[in-house]
Amino acid sequence: MPHLLTSILSAKHWDAAVITSLPNVRYLTGFTGSNAIVLVLPDQLILFTDPRYTIQAGQEFPGRTRIVKGPLENALKKWLSRMGFVAFENETIRYQSQIAVASLLPKRAKMEGMGPLIEELRMIKRPDEIANIRKAVTINSQAFDIAMKRFKPGVTERDLAAEIEYQMRRMGAEKPAFDTIVAFGQHSALPHARPRDVKIDGNGLLLIDMGAFWAGYASDMTRMAHLGRPPQRTKAHYRAVLEALEAAEASVKPGVAAKKVDAVARQVLQTHGMDKLFTHSTGHGLGLEIHEPPRVGRKMNTKLCAGMTITIEPGAYLQGEQGVRIEDTILVTENGAEILTPTSKDMLVL
Amino acid sequence: MPHLLTSILSAKHWDAAVITSLPNVRYLTGFTGSNAIVLVLPDQLILFTDPRYTIQAGQEFPGRTRIVKGPLENALKKWLSRMGFVAFENETIRYQSQIAVASLLPKRAKMEGMGPLIEELRMIKRPDEIANIRKAVTINSQAFDIAMKRFKPGVTERDLAAEIEYQMRRMGAEKPAFDTIVAFGQHSALPHARPRDVKIDGNGLLLIDMGAFWAGYASDMTRMAHLGRPPQRTKAHYRAVLEALEAAEASVKPGVAAKKVDAVARQVLQTHGMDKLFTHSTGHGLGLEIHEPPRVGRKMNTKLCAGMTITIEPGAYLQGEQGVRIEDTILVTENGAEILTPTSKDMLVL
């Protein structure tokens, strides 16, 4: 990775790049602490962190490390004070940090925003990253299976979310990748529903959207269950979304634009008169962050490449009635989508 | 709250203030979404968020709300384009957001960093905030009690952390306030230890540091247990830290500088020859964030006031051997510290 970055430095005529986004710091160095900057130089990376992390930095990053008391930016002075052209992460850096870094440069020097350059490098996963995502996906599905086996009508949305997150942790997850969504009945029509102290009982659709972190890497899955026998209308609603999911997954291959996959999902829903009910993007990249590039949305020209890990998650939401979303985590391979999520896509009847 | 802010605007000669920190947005408006800006004007607050939150914003904030597609900053133009002096949150705003806001102002206009002004307002809690913190503290202690009753030697650190977080959720917590620390034996000497797949078995100290969110507000508690009969040396280690905690708590009253409370804890540990083993601050404010002003540290001149909620958490860490930390959440009252944490401060023997 360093050699790739150094060739980017050279191509852009940057003397150095200052990396301040923590997921990017972790990506470049393996360091997992909560306070760090990486200075990318033509011949090396230097990690800056504080004394709380002296031991941990030594264990996680084999390269040159500086332990700094006080603001980390100040420690960059030794390097930056003789540079002319320095890149920084303009999309994520804090204003105060940018001001501090800029103040260290000579007067004639220039800074250039590097945009989501590291995020774009991160889109294509290394084999060790893919292995971690596979494990995060497996844990997540196992936790889902156990929680569903133990499910009894009358439990609240909140308690079921607690049970799911507990089972993830028992399987070895570091933590949930996001706040678990458990949404019953009408509530399933809210894409960002929060679990309530409301009992899951009687008849209706149950939406569960859950993810786990393993070794820093995320998984993401949505599955639907139905309490009682699902009516024909609900079955049709479910089948339409499932068809959109499967068509979108089938359209995935290297060289296809992300927006094309999004369009495939929308077209299927349109044939069912449900395209207006699909109010979000079809998916997103995931890795060290639960949402990272590429977004699988209407306007995303980014071409899919082998090694990308993304979600495919079409939905159709009937406000005041019910919503359906089905979501897999997939790996883009030379042969198309490898669906990592092992959980059955049948609607579970509880 | 608006009238206090408007008097600040007037005193500082600001035409408006742009609030971009999400905890500050929540504090000022009650809005809990993940994408928002608040514009503070002399006569009102305006909340800007995106279409995902149309319904939620209406439920949570009774004031004027603008639903915006695309970057929220752009929607400020209508107001900012005629202003001369605008405050912004320089310590937390992202560089790109600051650039976007600045570009909307007329050429002659000026922006001024407001520092942690809203964070300072947040230091003194309203009665409803204190009620939420009390509940978060109660839930946390109940979860601790249940998890400790169910504890059996041989469980791993990771599983005990999972059990604790599950019990919190069962008691109604939204989520843990931070990654629960469960650290056994030598590992208890690491103040920021992460739970391992290591069995808690045999003899040794067990450190548990845990907190819960309730209605957006945090609690924080650390307690120690010992597997097997604690040796005299461990008892002495524990008693020294407990003495430091109790002395620091007794020193709390309105008008006392935060650094004085920190000094009291250090002085007690010094009489036991343990001041060098106390490698962090004595405590921190907590509320909408798990760490917020005032820090209870060596150099903090901030004077304690009735209505502040802070932690007191002295520790003494013998690297390679064992560590002890004991932590309460307290409320500063006219009569001194009210210790909110109900859990016994005796070392639990398991």
Image (cartoon, coloured by chain):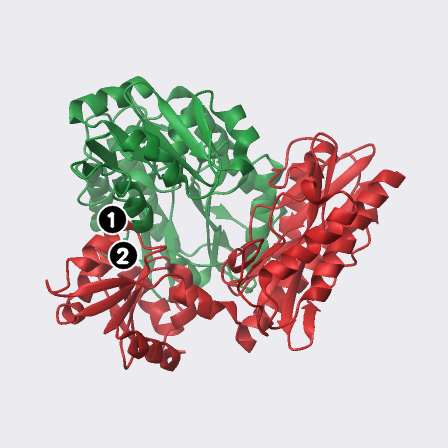
Chain colours: A red, B green
Percent x, y of residue B35:
45, 40
User: Could you tell me residue A191's position as x and y percent?
Assistant: 63, 41
Q: Nearer the viewer, mark 2 or mark 1?
A: 2
Residue at point 44%, 37% (across, down): B219
Q: Earlier in the sequence, mark 2 or mark 1?
A: 1
Is residue B329 at least partly visible in the picture? no
Name the image quarter holding residue B5.
top left
**Which disc number belongs to residue B269?**
1
Residue drawn where x is 32% and y is 78% of the image: A11
B210 shown above or below A40: above
Element type at marker 2? helix
Q: Position of residue A129 (x, y in %)?
A: 54, 71
Q: Is residue A90 left or right of residue B173?
A: left
Q: Quadrant of the C terminus of chain A?
A: top right
* Residue A74 position in % (x across, y down): 18, 60
Asked whether the beta carbons under mark 2 and mark 1 sit within 8 Å of each other, the answer is yes
Quarter of the image with the N terminus of chain A in it: bottom left
Residue B250: mark: none
Category of crowding for the residue at label 2, using alpha-carbon neighbours closer than 10 angstroms: few (below 14), some (14–19), many (at least 20): some
**Kind of residue at disc 1:** Leu
Number of numbered labels in the structure image: 2
Chain letter of disc 1?
Answer: B
Q: Looking at the image, which is closer to me, B141 or A344?
A: A344
- Asked if residue B129 can be seen in this view, the reply is yes
State whether discs 2 and 1 lie on one chain. yes
* Label 1 CA crowd tier, 10 Å (few <14, some 14–19, many 20+): many
User: Is B66 rendered above or below residue B52?
Assistant: above
**Which amino acid, by three-letter code, is at mark 2?**
Leu
Q: Secondary structure at mark 1?
A: helix
Determine which quarter of the picture holds residue B288.
top left
Q: Which residue is mark 2?
A: B277
